[in-house]
Amino acid sequence: MTLGVEKPHDELGLTLEAWAGGFMTGSLVIMACITVANMRRRVLLHKLILIELVFGMVQGTSIFPDPPYYGWYLATGGIFLNTSWTLHNIIAWLKNKPFLSRKASMIYIWTVIAAQPFWIIEMVSAFLYFNNINNLFTYTRPWEALFRDPWWVFTSASLLWNIKRRYDFSLTELIKVSPRFGILLIAMVVSIIFIIIDILSVTHVIYGRGSPDGINPYWKLAYVFKCLTDTVVLDDFKTALDRLKQHKMSALGGFATFSAFDHDGPPGTVDRRYSDAVTKKLELARKDSKGLSTQKWDTDIEALEFCTVPENVYQKDKRLSRSSDSRSV
């Protein structure tokens, strides 16, 4: 059976598809270079982001081969592309994981795994369709967004919700303090907009001239902006936001950790220090990170407590004197 599927032949369709492929490949190359320049050794998350970008580049050059190689090249590139999409969801899980409960985290990653049989079917159907063997792809393509994007939409909503709930930042203030986060949030919104347009295209609400069914530039634009969110903030969201909050508090006057001996004010004044429970957690973190010079751990700013220094702190006994002398040495 011959389906008559070939690469875009209409002048407008060919130009649009060539532009979209070039835009996607060029963007991914630049983002890959930026990732390599900023990634840290032995950080799995950074390596996964780089692999995600490299795997997506193949599909961006599918406009060059002519039939019969066009179908083979497009289907082969689709294998790497679908793998990249799955990697993006795994990366989103790793970045959002510190904000999730264990149950929510397990549901997230296991549903990503449960979606993989669909992608195996999609790879096979794409090969059959673009080689004019079977039209199963025309039925599976409209379902791609359902097996590709819910996790990304959830991650975007979760980030916005946690910024609102956990951090003393308005979106405007966050963007002013960190334009990097402003780019991330804008890229999230733009990617979701193009996801919606792609759905409208594959369900034939809007049509692409001269292009085979399922071929359009919208998913490429959505994919680029999703990858941009991975590249612009390489670390997980909580680590990045904690650093911003620490920077903000430092700018507002600092947040030193004082012991009772370091307090210079009169009795009854307000001091800022860690509770005993928080101190124990920090000691455990120091032990866990001992010997790993490249590992960084961040102070939990929210654990700082305001407390009143009691009168008996200022009694000058031998124990206080010895502690003070040992610090001065």
Image (spheres, rainbow, N blue to C red):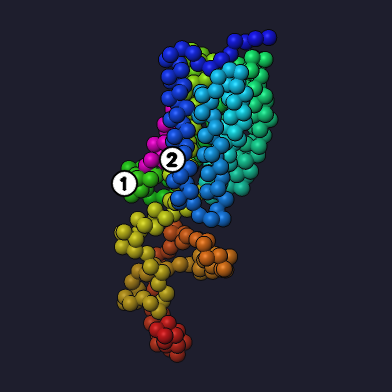
Say which residue appears at 40% left-offset and 79% top-offset.
261
* Residue 141 drawn above or below residue 298: above
Residue 215, x across and y down, in percent: 52, 20
**Which quadrant does the N terminus fall into?**
top right
Horizontal side of residue 101 vs 165, given as left or right: right
Name the residue type under label 2: Ile
Amino acid at pointer 1: Lys
Q: Residue at x 44, y 58 (%)?
A: 302
Whether residue 253 is situated above or below residue 237 in the rendered picture = below
Give the Cα distance between marks 1 and 2: 25 Å
Kindly report the secondary structure that dominates the magenta region of the rendered protein: helix
Identify the residue at horizontal 57%, vertical 32% (top origin): 81
- The residue identified by callout 1 is 176
Q: Is residue 208 left or right of residue 183?
A: right
Q: Quadrant of the C terminus?
A: bottom left
Where residue 15 sits, quadrant-wise, is top left
The location of residue 95, given as percent across then percent down, is 52, 46
Residue 221 lies in magenta, yes or no? no
Can the viewer see residue 229?
Answer: no
Looking at the rendering, the stretch of residues picked out in magenta corresponds to: 182-194
Q: Find disc 2 in the rendering and name its residue.
A: 30
